[in-house]
Amino acid sequence: MTDRPIAVVTGASSGIGAATARALAGAGFHVVLGARRVDRLEEIAKEIDGTALRLDVTDKESAAAFVEAVPECRLLVNNAGGAKGLEPVAEADEDDWRWMFEANVIGTLRLTQGLLPKLRASGDGHIITVTSIAALAPYDNGAGYTGAKHAQAMLHRTLRGELLGQPIRLTEICPGMVETEFSLVRFEGDQEKADDVYRGLTPLTAEDVADVIAFAATRPSHVNLDQITLMPRAQASASRAYREG
Ligand code: NAP
């Protein structure tokens, strides 16, 4: 496939994942891009001389076939996922919760388990997981997403201890508000509701987060950046932001 070190980015068809694929290619990696929208992956792969592979992290067979097709792996970026719905627990939709746990938690489990032998064999592996500030504290109407992100974070943080002594670093990235397709997915395509999330402030861009991921990935092998939280200047927590106007 390549003589460059291989980085796998899940959810690379849009937002943070697409920007991360570009940033890692710029840092010298051959990037394997995974997601369901293969047409988008192929466009980015062509631009950065990477490899596009179909991946549905909620489907066991799809995840297994993807892992099988990756020849070697130095870096895994667990990024695929997102939120669905924003309701109080009393009105929460069970299917939304199921999707959030399947995509964010079980998806991360599948890819991590599948690629661990290759990360270990690389002699200098690195797992970067994009959780969220939703993995740090609860917020009203967000229990399905905060619950899934806390569980994903626990999977990732537990590995830090379990893999001690092995040549694998672990970095958790906890972004606040980033303007991507995230809110459009959360509100089932309702553009007005999605735009309202970022109203009156300057949110992070996908490139801002990708920069930080590429920074973590390019530190010397003995340096482990454990957890990085980044938010827009105008945001203090998941439930507190300053908006103009
Ligand atoms: P996005 O633009 O909606 O990107 C989500 C990515 O995940 C897409 O590439 C999507 O690709 C992929 N994905 C979704 N379901 C998948 C599945 N079943 N199998 C494979 N890929 C799947 O949103 P984003 O903001 O970049 O989100 C990336 C990560 O950052 C998510 O884990 C999200 O929870 C986290 N995050 C986002 C924010 C924010 O404010 N935007 C803040 C903190 C954390 P396909 O649809 O093509 O499969």
Image: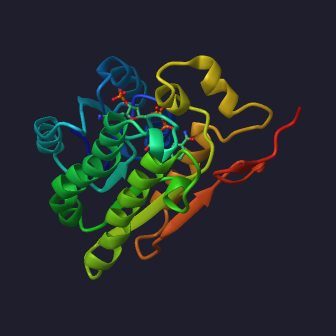
- Nearer to me, 228 or 72: 228
Q: In the displayed structure, would residue 155 be above or below residue 87?
A: below
Instruction: Say whether residue 153 is visible.
Output: yes
Specify the quadrant of the image occupied by residue 46: top left
Percent across and percent down for residue 140 are: 58, 49
Q: In the displayed structure, would residue 95 be above or below residue 165?
A: above
Percent across and percent down for residue 32 are: 30, 38
Percent across and percent down for residue 47 are: 43, 25
Quarter of the image with the C terminus is top right
Quarter of the image with the N terminus is top left
Tally of marks: 0
Quick check: 37 left or right of 72? right
Colour theme? rainbow
Specify the quadrant of the image occupied by residue 164: bottom left
Quick check: 70 left or right of 212? left
> Residue sitting at 24 percent across and 33 percent down?
56
| Quadrant location, ligand no. 1 | top left
Residue located farthest toward the bottom when viewing the structure as drawn:
165
- Nearer to me, 44 or 143: 143
Instruction: Say whether residue 33 is visible.
Output: no
> Residue sitting at 20 percent across and 50 percent down?
110
> Residue sitting at 45 percent across and 72 percent down?
224
> Residue sitting at 17 percent across and 64 percent down?
121
Quick check: 172 left or right of 137? left
Percent across and percent down for residue 172 are: 46, 61
